[in-house]
Image (tube, helix red, strand yellow):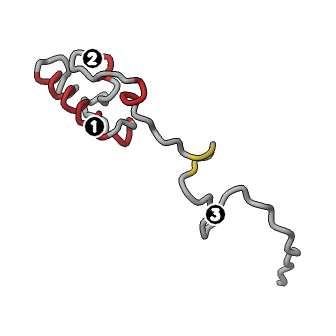
Amino acid sequence: MTFIRKPAGQAKPQKYSTDAYGRPAGKFRRNGPIRKKVCRFCADKVEIDYKNLSLLHTFVTEKGKILSGRMTGTCAKHQRELDTAIKRARMIALLPFTVN
């Protein structure tokens, strides 16, 4: 059995750099580069309050766990304030500790 090699054509010019396996180098998704998440408290100048339950519910999972700053995009300063506000709301029974 003999193998016939195809003649090598010219390579297409690439729009981005690739790694050793031909995949796009850096942080890419299928639709383009990954956008950096922006802290919504810094951008909108929103104040974190333990009585604002609609705001606090967006940073808590269905099971009652506090979402990390990497998932929500909040900066370290506001993540600490958010953590304190959620714990304070739990202590006075505005938010549940866990959901059964």
Percent position of residue 35, x then y: 53, 42
Q: Which residue is mark 2?
A: 53
| Residue kind at label 2, given as amino acid type | Leu
In primary-sequence order, the first of circles 1 and 3 is 3
Disc 1 designates what residue?
A: 77
The local secondary structure at tag 1 comes to helix
What is the CA distance from the residue labelled 2 to the residue labelled 3? 46 Å
What's the residue at 64%, 63% (across, down)? Answer: 18
What is the total number of numbered labels drawn onto the structure image?
3
The mark found on residue 55 in the picture is: none
Kind of element beneath mark 3:
loop
Mark 1 vs mark 3, CA separation in Å = 36 Å
Residue 49 picture location, percent across and down: 24, 20
Q: Are marks 1 and 3 in contact (CB under 8 Å)?
A: no
In the structure shown, which secondary structural element does the residue marked by tag 2 occupy? Answer: helix
Residue 83's x, y, as percent?
22, 33
In the depicted structure, whether residue 12 falls above or below residue 33: below
